[in-house]
Image (cartoon, helix red, strand yellow):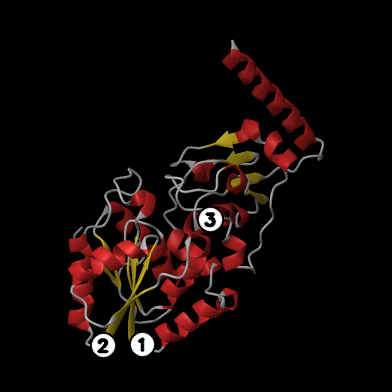
Amino acid sequence: MQRTLKEIGIKSLGLVSRLLIRLGILDKQIIVRIDGGICSQMHFYLIGRWFAEKGIKVKYSIDWFDENGWDLNKQFVRSFDLLKAFPELVFEPSSRIERLLYKPFRYTDSVNWTKVSAPCYLCGYYHFPEITAFLTRYFKVDISVLDQQNSRARKSILSRHNSVAVHVRRGDLSIYVPAYGEPSSDDYFRRAVNYFQARFEDCYFYFFSDEPQYVKDHLIAYLELSDNYSVMDFNDSAKGYMDLLLVASCNHQITSQGSLGLVGAALNNYPNKIIACRDDDRCRAFFSVDSSNVVFIEQ
């Protein structure tokens, strides 16, 4: 009975919303709900831009950051950082009343989202096969958002001839997660590091991780590095977007099961960049448009 009453309420709300749209009181649009870390926020933003390029009015919902705002383990904070990292973006937030009136138009199908039409409230996770092309179209590294410490770090990175960003994703992805697979193995990182050391005599590795102590205590010793590395441990999860901009400033990237290394590699505009990533379906799909500068390494 309770479920039936809820369904009746949503259906009735939908009728009211359609009437308001017909009368021009409520905009006919697509609302995209944004959640997660900086790379997920960028992903959702691009979903909206895909529709906007087709002439559909788009707004964004950021209420998740007030209602949740944590990773899967409730260990690392997730703040709305999109406009901190990319302040020049065209961004129109939805109002609370709009989100309420669009509740009957919720859509979560991860595959067929490109076929929806307004009115629609996109509240799921969506596969975006064109994402690398859209990333470089809408996002550019803006060094003006970096604080003093990160600006100094970027100068250090730019002083190296072959700087290599190594993204070591831990936290809630340090165990198997269906959407991301198994965590990246120590052997994967060793093979990737060895690849760059064999190719360049002067490569220098910058490690970025949500668990930098793990990198220091465990991974570095396994990789048998000398003095050609730094662990970038000064940005906590609230400043993950600054890590992203530093990753993108390196000449080359070693990615992991998370998105930060992949997105940083896509934003990297160094013409001779090399991207080392896991040989799995997710990475191959991410670089499906152009993988000429990508090295796929066994996990």
Q: Is residue 1 left or right of residue 242?
A: right
Q: Which of the two labelled residues, at mark 2 and mark 3, occupies the earlier sequence position?
A: 3
In the image, residue 19 lies at what x, y percent?
A: 77, 30
Say which amino acid is labelled 2.
Answer: Asp
In the image, residue 125 lies at what x, y percent?
A: 47, 44
Q: Tell me the residue at 37%/60% (across/down).
A: 211
Label 2 Cα crowd, 10 Å radius (few <14 / some 14-19 / many 20+) = few
From the viewer's side, name the closer residue of 77 and 51: 77
In contact (CB < 8 Å): disc 2 and disc 1:
yes
From the viewer's side, name the closer residue of 221 and 240: 221
Q: Tell me the residue at 51%/46% (across/down).
A: 114
* Separation (CA) of disc 2 from disc 1: 8 Å
Q: Is residue 62 left or right of residue 295?
A: right
Q: Is residue 193 visible?
A: yes
Image quarter (top left, top right, bottom left or bottom right) of the C terminus: bottom left
Q: Tell me the residue at 66%/50% (across/down).
A: 59
Compared to residue 58, the image places residue 274 above or below, namely: below
Q: Which residue is mark 2?
A: 202
Image quarter (top left, top right, bottom left or bottom right) of the N terminus: top right
Q: Which mark is residue 41?
A: 3
Q: Is residue 187 left or right of residue 18?
A: left
Q: Which mark is residue 160?
A: 1
Q: Which of the two labelled residues, at mark 3 and mark 1, occupies the earlier sequence position?
A: 3
- Asked which secondary structure carries label 1, the reply is loop
Say which amino acid is labelled 1.
Answer: Arg
- Asked which secondary structure carries label 2, the reply is loop
